[in-house]
Each structure stands twice: as C-alpha cells, then as structure tokens.
Image (tube, rainbow, N blue to C red):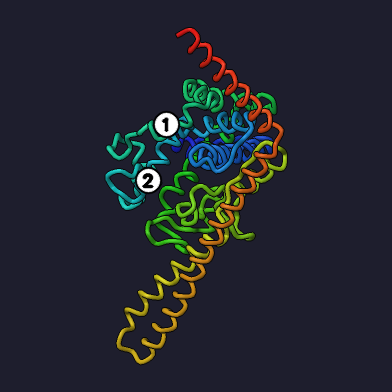
C-alpha cells in the first residue's frame, strides 16, 4: 500500500496534471480532506483517544473515527495501544514500537513493514477505550470504513464536481501520501531535529517547522513531558491548530474537561533543564578563575528554585484540602444529603424492628 500509493503520487499525479490539468475543486477537496485526516489523527486518535486529554461529544468522536479511518493508520484502538506503549518505553530499542534510536528509516516507516517484537501490541493498555461503543464499532468495521472513505468519498466528490479522475488522484492518492508522511515525521524527525527546553531525558524535540507540517504536533519535547495536556504548543505564538480546534469545539459545546498542566509545572521543567545544563557547562570550565564564582551563583539560584517548588507544593496541597473541605460542606448541606440521611434513619429503624421480631420468633 505504501509503495503503490507513493509510486502513483510521484508519477501518475504529475503526468495527469501536465496532460489534462486539475480543476480548482479537486485542489480544494485535496486541502480539505488532508486537513480533516490530519486533525482526526492529532485531535482524535492522539490527544483524545490515546491520552484522554479532554472529553468529546459522540458526534465529534464519530467524525474523528471516520476521517481517522480515511488516514489509513489503523483503527483508533490499535493506534492508541501502540502509542501508549511508545510513551511508556520511549527510546528503548527492544520495546518502543518506533524507537528513534534505531534510525530515521525505522522510526519513520520501517517499523510498519515487518513484524518487529517491539511492535507487538498490548491491548491491556486500552481497556478504557474498549468500553467505548463508537470506538469499538470503528475497530470492528475498520476495513470497510477505510475503503469507503478512501475510494468511495473521493470518487463521489469527483463525480459531483465533474472530474472523477483528477479529484481521485489529488483528494484520494496524493492526500493519502502527504498525510502519511506528515504524521510519520512526528515519530522520526520530531525525535531527531529540534530543541529540548523541557527535558533531556529522552530524544523528543520541539521543532516549529515540523509543527507547521503536522498541525501542531511538532512541539514534541513538551508533549512527552506533559502528555495529558490537550495542547502541544503552549506559547501564544506557537503554531498548534489542533489546540485551537479543540478549544473551538469546547466553545461549541462539543468538547469539555480540557486538561492543562499548571503553568508553575511548565516553568519548573524549563528551569530544571537550565540548571542541569548550567552544571554541565560549569563542569567543563573547572579550573578557570571565574568558575567557582559562577558555581556559587548557580547554587544560590538553585536553592531559591527548590524553595519555590517546596512552597508551591505546600500551597497546592492546601488548596486541594480546602477544595475537598468545601465540597464536603456543600454536600452536607445539599437536599440530596438530607434525603439520604432520612432514608438511612428509616432503614436503621426498620433494622431495629426486624431484630425485635427475630428475638420474638427465637
């Protein structure tokens, strides 16, 4: 499938364009379906199903599942199982399904071309998803949905705009190849090219160019540090249309409970990485005249950093306790709680009467 679709995209697609030309409607459907595929993978398969970073209305989940099937990246259940394994065993050549340490080709596409032991799926990781009826419906009927969305929909759109062949080549074949390799860049290039502002404990990197190609997924260092945040690009200037779409769906009432990492935790990760790099640089400058002075300043700043972390943790615990206490007090005063207490009192009285009856019977 990968070989045939790629061969058609680089030979037949340009030949048809030179020989017959493409209508504007064919290009329009190419752009729209490419975006629909990309968003279904990033907002649906990835941030919703694999990481549960928010909750979505059934209508929105259905759209993700249909256009996710069109992206031809397996069912959402299988996709999430592999991706959760990747997060748990990142950079482990024996267990990470698409470990970047095994090279660009393997992490980009090679891991799907052979049955590697690292690619074995553990479906126990997705037991929560197996309770989702819509998701299981897509999983059971994935082949039929994939064929209908990849052949039926482009052909139907081509018939509607009077250019069946041209629309199918652009919105069917070229769209699929571009969608595939844009997504695969997240597994390969996003672990090899870019910066690591939040952690150096794994190969994931932030790269604005990859984010531009992958609907915001290129801020991969942040994602692997804070996987359950519905955002990847947390700065206002970072390109993350997946985050914007999810926020729009929340405004429309189709998404809720969007998870966000507290800003303090993000700052803590940034500072922790900076301190680690400063220590490494100081170790390389040992023996220089100003090294000890710099080491003392770094140590002083690190003590302030640790004190701030401790204070934040204490305040956060206090806030949780206050929230818990307020919820208990609100519950105690609620009409429902009063009714429950009345029922409990009636049951207790009935229990006493039954004990009396049993004693009389005995």
Q: Looking at the image, is 289 positioned above or below residue 184?
A: below
The residue pinned by badge 1 equals 1
The front one of 12 and 192 is: 192
Q: Which residue is located at x 57 percent, y 28 percent?
A: 66
Question: In front: mark 1 or mark 2?
Answer: 2
Q: Is residue 113 left or right of residue 64?
A: left
The front one of 8 and 267 is: 267
Quarter of the image with the N terminus is top left
Q: Is residue 161 left or right of residue 189?
A: right
Sequence-wise, which precedes: disc 1 or disc 2? 1
Q: Which residue is located at x 43 percent, y 33 percent?
A: 126
Q: Looking at the image, is 225 positioned above or below residue 10?
A: below
> Circle 1: is it few (<14), some (14-19), or many (20+) Cα within 10 Å?
few
Residue 155's disc number: none
The residue pinned by badge 2 equals 88
Pinpoint residue 173: horizontal percent, then vertical percent. Answer: 52, 34
């Amino acid at each position: 499938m990968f070989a045939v679709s790629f061969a058609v995209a680089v030979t037949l697609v340009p030949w048809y364009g030179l020989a017959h030309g493409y209508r504007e409607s064919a290009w329009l459907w190419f752009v729209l379906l490419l975006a629909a595929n990309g968003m279904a993978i990033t907002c649906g398969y990835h941030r919703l199903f694999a990481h549960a970073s928010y909750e979505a209305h059934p209508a929105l989940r259905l759209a993700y599942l249909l256009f996710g099937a069109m992206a031809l990246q397996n069912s959402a259940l299988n996709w999430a199982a592999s991706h959760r394994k990747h997060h748990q065993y990142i950079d482990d050549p024996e267990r990470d399904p698409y470990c970047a340490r095994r090279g660009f080709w393997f992490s980009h596409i090679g891991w799907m071309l052979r049955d590697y032991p690292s690619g074995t799926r553990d479906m126990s990781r997705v037991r929560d998803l197996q309770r989702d009826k819509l998701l299981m419906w897509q999983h059971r009927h994935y082949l039929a949905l994939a064929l209908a969305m990849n052949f039926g929909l482009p052909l139907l759109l081509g018939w509607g705009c009077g250019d069946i062949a041209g629309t199918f080549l652009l919105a069917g074949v070229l769209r699929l190849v571009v969608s595939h390799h844009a997504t695969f860049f997240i597994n390969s290039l996003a672990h090899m090219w870019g910066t690591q502002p939040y952690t150096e404990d794994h190969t994931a990197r932030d790269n604005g160019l990859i984010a531009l190609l992958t609907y915001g997924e290129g801020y991969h260092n942040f994602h692997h540090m804070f996987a359950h945040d519905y955002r990847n690009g947390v700065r206002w200037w970072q390109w993350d249309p997946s985050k914007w779409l999810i926020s729009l769906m929340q405004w429309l009432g189709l998404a809720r409970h969007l998870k966000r990492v507290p800003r303090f935790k993000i700052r803590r990760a940034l500072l922790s990485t900076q301190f680690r790099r400063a220590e490494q640089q100081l170790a390389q400058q040992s023996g220089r005249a100003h090294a000890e002075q710099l080491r003392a300043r770094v140590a002083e700043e690190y003590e302030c950093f640790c004190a701030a972390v401790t204070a934040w943790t204490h305040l956060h615990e206090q806030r949780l306790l206050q929230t818990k206490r307020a919820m208990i007090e609100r519950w105690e005063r609620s009409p429902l709680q009063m009714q429950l207490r009345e029922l409990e009192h009636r049951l207790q009285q009935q229990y006493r009467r039954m004990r009396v009856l049993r004693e009389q019977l005995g």
